[in-house]
Amino acid sequence: MAIREFLKGATEIGKAMGVTLKALAEQPVTTEYPRDPVPLYPRFRGKHELRRYENGMERCIGCMLCEAACPTGAIYVEAAENDPQHPTSPGERYATVYEVNLLRCIFCGDCEEACPTEAIVLGHDFAMANYNRRDFILTKAELLNPGEPNVVIRPE
Amino acid sequence: MGLEEKLPEGILTTQLETLVNWSRENSTWPLLFGLACCAIEMIATGSARHDISRYGSELFRASPRQADLMIVSGRVSNKMAPVIKRLHDQMSEPKWVIAMGICASAGGPFNNYAIVQGVDKIIPVDVYVPGCPPRPESLLYALDRLRAKQGKETFRTYVDFKAPPLSKQPDEISSLESLRRPQLA
Amino acid sequence: MLNVSPRTRAYETLPGLNPLGIPAVAPLPSGESPDTARIVERFGTALLAAGLHNGQQVVYVAPGQLVALAEFVRQDPQLCYEALIDVSAVDRSELPVSDQRFHTIYQLRSYARKQHLTVVCPLADSGRPSVPTLAGVFAGATWPEREVWDLMGIRFTGHPDPRRILMPESWPNHPLQKQVPVGGEEVPFTLTWSDPEFESFGKQVLAAESKPPVLPPGMSRENMIINMGPHHPSTHGVLRLVVELDGETVVNVDPDLGYLHSGFEKTGENKRYKDFVYYTDRMDYLSAMSNNMGYCLTVEKLLGIAVPARGQVLRVLMAELQRLASHLFWLSTHVLDVSGTGMALLMYATRERERILDLFEMACGARLTVGYMRVGGVSRDLPPAFLGHLDGFLRAMAERIDDYERMLTHGPLWEERLRGVGHVSREQAINLGLTGPMLRGSGVDWDLRRDAPYGGYEQYDFKVPVFSEGDCYARYLLRMEEMRQSLRIIRQAVDRLPDGPFRVEDRKITPPPRAELDISMEALIHHFKLMTEGFQAPPGMVYHGIESSKGELGFFVYSDGSAKPYRLHVRGPSFNNLFAISNMSKGAMLSDIVTNIGSIDIVLGEVDR
Amino acid sequence: MDWLNLIVIPVVRSLVLIFVLLTGFAYLTWYERKLLARFHVRYGPNRAGPKGLLQPVADAVKALFKEEIIPGHVDKVVYLLAPALALAPALLIWAVIPLGKDFPAVADVPIGFLWILAVAGIESYGVILAGWSSNNNYSLLGALRSSAQMISYELPLGLFLISILLLAGDFSLVNLAEAPRQWWEWIWLWIMFPLFFICVLAETNRSPFDLPETENELIAGFQTEYGGIKFALFFMAEYINMITTSAIMATLFFGGYALPFGIGSEILPWLGPFILFGKVVVLLFLFIWVRASIGRPRYDQLMHFSWKTLLPISLAYMVITALLTVFLKA
């Protein structure tokens, strides 16, 4: 009786070792991150970007809806009237100050949902780590000029 | 510190520095220590898909005495803060801290009575990682930034560190560093 | 900063509320449902009110009658409310009522009769609000009552263990009382960097605080006392267990919680209904979808809206994927706890979990904290490639589960470690208020998906696995079977996925589609209103529980008619389940504690909230 | 020239051996991390040097340059002595293991067998002292577990070794490795190999019997308070023990430095160490494979298994071996 159980245990252990041995023959599933590109899905929400129209005008009209919609208060907008001769945005107003505090943002996407002109979008940049807390406040200049040219993402 | 305090200055030291920094870059053992959501992504970073072991960092040590890197992964409550401070004190130099996620970096969405608004109020932080929680690749990138920082450190002057030009130039890390690394005479 | 949603409460415009405050319930003595009628029959005018409210049976009772009522509903064969699911309390000092500042609220459950009962106990006004404890009737009340004392400052007379539970012993206030501020600090932007107040950010280095440990009551220094946690590899986060050991045998275990207390409930009271969805993600961060679903269903119940068919199926699909992911993570951590770091199964389970996270990223744009569901439906429809990927995953997954079982189920070491360990009897499980796999593993055939269907679960064909052994091995087998059943539900959901809208078309609750913004002024107004103010919920209270992967996840919302919940309480399954740890571990070995923690499947974010 | 034979050559041999062993230890960690990674379907270290081959160097240099902390609450002398005491026996055993026909052991003592048993017994002292001197409950529990475990498993291990002795009839490992055996002897030996391997796993504190240092229960067991180079010494002891026991098993069960059926040992005698090395690598693979596949028992179950299952089996095995030897060999 005891011997039978002993042998049964041994075969079960053998089975478990078989599973791992099978895995040894498989190709690793690792993505070699810095070398290979990371597979990202189109809806992924990363670092914020402010978009422009094709003619170079800023999309943001300074309505502050994003600021109101943000669950954590990570966006700060100050708006001003456009100069009629040299308008910054096609609307009546534009944003003089547009800042995102990355260390409060939960990347929920409510700002892009709230924006009526699709000016703010969450891009695909996830490599945001840095050394100093002050570097995490994205100013308007940075938001308008992300590393790569403005991509049209998610006009859903 | 260990041996390096007793070494003379000179070319040999520079060479040795390079070697030591290289070894520290490639053998940063994190403390097995998770707090909240980010801990799950930290575990995911160790999992087969992202594989932190490529950096030689898969040996998560449970004892702070054997760890080099503390990844503060998640929100730090007021009750937890003294514990984290103590764990950091128990780690032996040289030690680094990554504040993973926005809760650890600045309190994140939990802007309330219970959460310490940024772990840097308790311990000095080397790299902050935004994201809620950051993707595993984000943490790997932070590890890369940390490696860049480790590579620039010297035995004599930990203070004069300037970050390499990656995406943007950080300010001079002055006060924070001087708090942590005693300046040698 | 723009003041987003001003704290104007709807009662300022809504005259003539029931003088008891909110909610209004039917007057005595009729009662409305058979159960409340039965209670009224027994207690008569000793009750304050009884009836149906938002479809739930509610009884108002004075503190003096509370224990008698609890004993009656528990023992009466016609009622048989055998489990206390939750205890919470409301501080009504900001409502336009002058008396009875505190109400304590109890949720009772009858498994045999599939009934739910809410008992509200208004407390007399005094400097030290107090109410008799129910811990003598339902052992499961012990921890929730400690939590109410800790956060709300209501004393429970006769409580067996009247310590604080979440906040540090030295904390000066009871944070959920309305006069206590939320706390926190201003969010810094570049213009405030020069402010001296913000200059200090990130530069304050405190000295380590080291206090001599306080020995919990009932432990002696005769034996070895070890502290497991808050930094310990196998407490699944920052749980602290003070363990009294005689050799390797556990004499006593005292859990110390609160190391991850993040003030969810207080935060929820200061956020609009839509904002809190994102916070629920971060509560039980292993099953964000289930949390979203529970919260949204609760608010929908309050609002009285029904989600369109496609939205419902999408929710079920996501919730079951999440259950699968959560169980996979449970499996890998359980294996890690029991078997050590080298064990390859840990990696295999997380590998499959990654595929689920990929699916989530495809649909929601985030891996872990998805924020996918909205009050009224889901945030987005599925992307085109989703179903193809899902199909591939489902095919692979069934084989993978067999692989896991091959490595564990009959393995002699695994069986030895789990069989007979952490035993919880049927009576104990009910009395302690355990839910989910902990309950079903002890032989109680109860699953909210089947017995109190929500979100369209009644249309799916699935089996609820039940094991009567009540040990860790039974719970292991149960969860493995639940994974298979989840696969079944997902397949059915994919098959029946109807066309149509995925969220309610009510413009007062969900924002209009983007295309409408450019052409319709009305849509734009709705959009602006929703984004700035959010939507208002009618006054009243509602409790809704769902079957999350860990047990019954309940949300209790007490609304005063404004755009923010007046009181939001979360019944975390892990919190109540963790209470069983001392019962399970007494007399076992040190290693068994680790097995038990893994078997309960706790998530500290939900325990401490 | 007696002093040359007596002192210089053994010293040189020892030094070479220690150097080889330390390198072996370093690359065993690399081997384990890489192999475990492949069991886990991932890559493993690949940043330091090509294929991560310099990873052990990085680990070593880093450990060397870590701050040395001696916590205030420890017994300093014993605390510092313990790692050395743990490492020394692991190296000492190698004095008697034959490496090849022309590369005999450092000392081919006629009682090589007893030497192994005696020295292996010292090993647990390092662990026990480490646990006791650390003045930490986790360390203490780890040390207690370790001592009980080592003592319990030394018994069946000893009995198995005695059976092998009965078959070979010699205490010297060189003779043991070279002794010609009949086919039934080999089969009889190999039947016992899995059980012997279990004992070895327990003796070396390897997974699944790594209870003295179970991360999931005892943080790091007896090593909890050790960091930097002191921790590295414990690490080293564990891994060198693995190599040592693999070499012993290779010698006892698989003919040591000889190829099967005596092929080639006369033609290419210098192959000996390499053949031994190959066999050790295969056995180490077994260690790691087991680690990746099998879970841990509980502490009391481990004890039960030793006393209630292994001990009777090993006794019976010894008796049967004795009878076999008497009736078949004589």
Image (cartoon, rainbow, N blue to C red):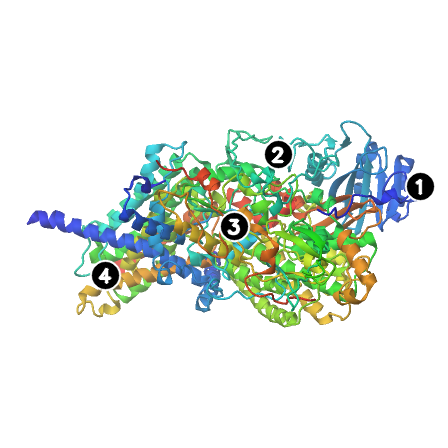
| Mark 1 neighbour class, 10 Å CA radius: few under 14, some 14 to 19, many 20 or more | some
**Chain for mark 1?**
C
Q: Secondary structure at mark 1?
A: loop
Residue C168's tag is: 2
The answer to whether tags 2 and 3 share a subunit is yes
- The front one of C300 and C162 is C300
Image mark for residue A12: none
Discs 1, 3 touching: Cβ within 8 Å: no
The residue labelled by disc 1 is C29
Tag 1 near tag 2, CB within 8 Å: no
Residue appearing at x 65%, y 71% in the figure = C387
Q: Amino acid at mark 4?
A: Pro
- Mark closer to the chain start, 1 or 3: 1
In this view of the protein, which residue sits in the foreground, D210 or D163?
D210
Q: How many marks?
A: 4
The crowd level at tag 2 (other Cα within 10 Å; few <14, some 14-19, many 20+) is some
Separation of marks 1 and 2 at Cα, in angstroms: 45 Å
Reading the image, the residue beneath label 4 is D273
Residue denoted by label 3: C337
Q: Quadrant of the C terminus of chain C?
A: top right
- Give the percent coordinates (x, y) of residue C228: 53, 40
Give the secondary structure at mark 2.
Answer: loop
For numbered disc 4, what is the local secondary structure? helix
Amino acid of disc 2: Pro
